[in-house]
Amino acid sequence: MRFLEFAALAVRNLRGYALRSFLTTLGVVFGIASVVTMMALGRGAEDEILREIDKLGITNVIINSVKPPEDTSANATRSWTVKYGLTFADFDQIEETVRGLRHALPVHSYVERAWEGSKREDVLVQGVTPSYFTATKIVVARGRGLTVADEEARRPVAVVHQQLIRALGYYGDPLGYDLRVGEQIYEVVGILEDEEFQGFIRKALSSPDRRDNEIYVPYATVLTRIGTKSTSRKSGAYESTDIELNQIVVEVADQVNVAPVARMLRTLLENLHESKDYELVVPLELLEQRRRYQAVFNIALLLIAGISLLVGGIGIANIMLATVTERTREIGVRRAIGAKRKHIMSQFLIETVMLSAAGGILGVAVGYAGTLAMEWYTGWQAQFTPDVALWALAVACGVGILSGVFPAWRASKLDPIQALRYE
Amino acid sequence: MSDAGGPLLDARNLHRWYGEGEARVEVLRGIDLSVEQGEYAAIVGASGSGKSTLLSILGCLDRPGEGTYRLAGHDVLSLRDDKLSELRLREIGFVFQSFQLIPQLSILENTEVPLFYAGVRRGDRHAKAMASLERVGLGHRVKHRPTELSGGEQQRAAIARALVHDPPLLLADEPTGNLDSETGRTILQLIDDLHDEGRTVLVITHDQTVADHAPRRIRIMDGTIESDRRREVVT
Ligand SMILES: Nc1ncnc2c1ncn2[C@@H]1O[C@H](COP(=O)(O)OP(=O)(O)OP(=O)(O)O)[C@@H](O)[C@H]1O
Ligand SMILES: [Mg+2]
């Protein structure tokens, strides 16, 4: 029918009752706004986690050494050096027996102090093989990464974050800088790309003793120069540990084999280790877990959305019923002049839909503002996508139709002559 | 549409009552009325005699409790609601005794309402409504709301609205009731013109001048037609 004409009439009428129209939509406005905000925050969080998981490499299985729970039994031999974690033997077993791997990468790391003059910085020295960079998606921004030649010649070279060098008070070009770490001197050959976020998973993956500064040096260099024993000070007391490998990164050749490989690794390590002095991190499993959480979150969101929009819709229906009663005479006049029932019905239905659609648009705007405010206030990353806005509008229109049908039907059923006499 | 040669409207034995049983009030008690195409008739009678009730039945707004009514060849009482709306829109311009202007619309917008339902385009609606308002001498107050107008001005707006879509039949309930004699005369002249253009006009009035003006005078008393006189038109 002449939809635009009716839309114009609806706008005219709604403007006639501007304040009431505005107040009527508030329920929908806030319903939509809260949903839009929550969606944006939820998606932002999901995105961040996905990016993090992706950074860990979806085809990787990462095994970390962890300190086993304190053995308090009487027969525990109290030695000064605590030996635990992954061993070279574990690594060899994995390489030999587990099928479907691209490669397994050993990591040996230790914590030490870097220094320059009187400046001191705690660093986590990660002894890694050249493939570690590609497997864990660490990007070298300037200079070079570690090479097989570094490995074979056991060169004392390092790839570092620029901030570390700055923190030590050196403001020249970090490339070629001689970085002193404890008694060692490493030549800086590569600068890492700044990491935008340090998500909790990455933190969980690094050794429990990790410091904020990581440097990467050849695996062989660390083993020959430092060995497997290290001493660190913890709450005043010195603690000596002997960990052969802090981490093994297993890269699976094909993503479909990640789960079976993870299973195999678990069984293998269970057999090789008496205590649980290691942990397996499977990004793919984390991803799936995350998806399940997200699904639950989405259902909760839908529920909240449903309830708030129901409330908003009831509010609109209520006001529209009152409006129909109040405008009984107008309806009578229109009918007497020649409006058909369907005209009256369309008029009130379109008015209601426009009202709630306006509420939807306003709600999206308020939700967007709310999202920005939340981002600013909490520092979270939100993701506001146009499809959310479109969905919100569609839902708002749906609410309008549902809450408008009954009042509009009531209006169309009024008897003209009685409506004209209505006081 | 109309039957060739037959009267434009033809009502037989109209009865209308309100309430039931003890409280039943007989308002119309067997009205027979037939009006030819192009006729001009005044309906007079005491207050409460049933004039407005009769006019709403003739205007297809109300239904009689008993009787038959044909308008422009249609058996009105058997028509569906949609058809009734169409008939009102196409055939009838109705001036209500209490004006019945829509309060939140301007005078111009009120006048446009029939055109809206007749499917006239927006631009044409403005032009036609303006023309109609100018015809009743209200061209200068079109942006005002009905409440901002005097009773007489509202009455003229109601007339403008009834005429705007050029209906062949004009039913007016006291169109000069609130007008001074000067404006009243303009409206009378307007009605004369409409009649001369070939429209059928039925006017309820208490005003002797108006009643004298019409070639036919129908007097209602207690819900029946007491007299129905035609006189020679003096031109
Ligand atoms: N809805 C109604 N319910 C009950 N009685 C009604 C109703 N409408 C009209 N009446 C009665 O019908 C009678 C006729 O009313 P009507 O309006 O037709 O009179 P009228 O001839 O137009 O009078 P007036 O010249 O004062 O306008 C009145 O007595 C009135 O009380
Ligand atoms: Mg009356």
Image (spheres, coloured by chain):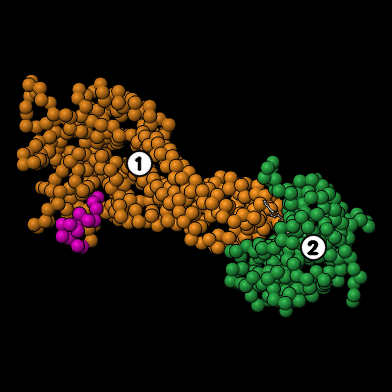
Chain colours: A orange, B green
The secondary structure type at the circle numbered 1 is: helix
Visible in this render: residue B73?
yes
Visible in this render: residue A36?
no
**In this picture, residue A417 sits left or right of residue A192:** right
Look at the image and tell me in which quarter the N terminus of chain A lies: bottom right
Residue at (6% x, 32% y) in the render: A80
Q: Chain of mark 1?
A: A
Look at the image and tell me in which quarter the C terminus of chain A lies: bottom right
- Residue placed furthest toward the right: B5
| Residue of label 1 | A53
**In this picture, residue B85 sits left or right of residue A297:** right
**In this picture, residue B26 sits left or right of residue A144:** right
Label ID, residue A205: none
Whether A389 is drawn above or below A310: the answer is below
Range covered by the magenta-colored residues: A156-172
In x, y percent, where is residue A115?
A: 12, 53
Residue at (26% x, 28% y) in the render: A92
**Residue A71 sits in quarter:** top left
| Residue of label 2 | B43
Judge the density around disc 2: few (<14), some (14-19), many (≥20) Cα neighbours within 10 Å.
Answer: many
**Amino acid beneath label 1:** Ile
